[in-house]
Amino acid sequence: MVGVLSNKIGRGQLKPGDHIYSWRLAYLYAHHGIYAGDGKVIHFTRGAGHEIGTGSTALDRLIFSSSSSSSSHGSVIQCPECGDQSTLDGVICSCLDCFLSGGELYLFQYKVSPALFLAKARGGTCTLAASDPPEDVLHRAEFLMRNGFGGYNIFKNNCEDFAIYCKTGLLVVTNISVGRSGQAASFLAATSAIVSSPLRFLTTSFSGLAAVGCGLYCVSRFVSDIGVRRDVRKVPVEALVTPSGLTESEASTETAKEA
């Protein structure tokens, strides 16, 4: 049962339109998608499991080589239902087994209380924002499966961003901030709390530093959540695809560059 400690659910509890996720690489990150019913999941992928690509050649090589070596101990069996999807990228539809990739099944929570949100110390598991009806969620997911969701970006346009947009229809309207992803917000909040805050100089004790860091982390996560931030607006899914084939956010970025 979904609670404070875990969002794990059983397959029999799934309903079409649910936002689900599964942890990868020993809980380093989670892959997110929308359950479409009949054992199918629509999700946004970078291809070959490279959803956490950073853009740093050396770091990506280290991450993906360790991932490949850990998965190469057994032979890869091609899914009889999905075939080989390892080279696909963009918005795709997979069976639930391929989506989970051997991991457990978790349900992303919407419209949680501020207390529950902060109690979930790990980002990418819940949001204060409310979900739209399942029919709207599935309409967005299916439309984006046909038309795409732009280029994959770990901080601004990742698999969690895709699932949250499908559930809420909310898009970030500024180009300088992180996307909707709670995972990305948590990473940046942790980095800010540990490295960049001048408040770390107010105490020299370990417990004091931990308290300051924890407080900054919680505040940063909270203000970055899609349910409270003000740099978002509701965007119809049909408006995402421009005549040039770019998403609305990409098109605005290109226009800014040209100007």
Image: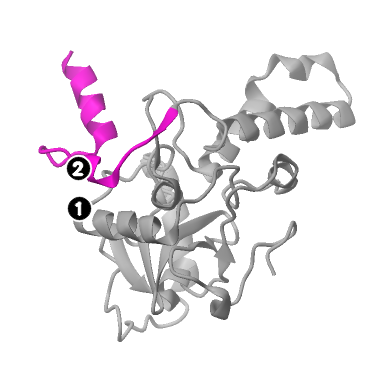
Work out how far the residue at label 2 is from the one at label 1, CA to CA, in angstroms.
Answer: 7 Å
Q: Quadrant of residue 248?
A: top left
Q: Which residue is at the far bottom? A: 80
**Secondary structure at numbered mark 2:** loop
Q: Which residues are magenta?
A: 232-259
On screen, residue 195 above or below 185: above
Left or right side of 130 for 204: right
Q: Position of residue 206 (x, y in %)?
A: 86, 30
Q: Residue at x 37, y 28 (%)?
A: 173
Q: Quadrant of residue 93?
A: bottom left
In the rendered image, residue 131 lying in the magenta stretch gets the answer no
On screen, residue 210 above or below 127: above
Q: Residue at x 29, y 63 (%)?
A: 92
Nearest the viewer among 116 and 5 is 116
Q: Are the residues tagged 2 and 1 within 8 Å (C-beta)?
A: yes
Residue occupied by mark 2: 241
On screen, residue 79 above or below 37: below
Left or right side of 135 for 130: right
Q: Residue at x 30, y 86 (%)?
A: 80
Give, as a three-letter code, the residue at label 1: Asn
Residue occupied by mark 1: 147
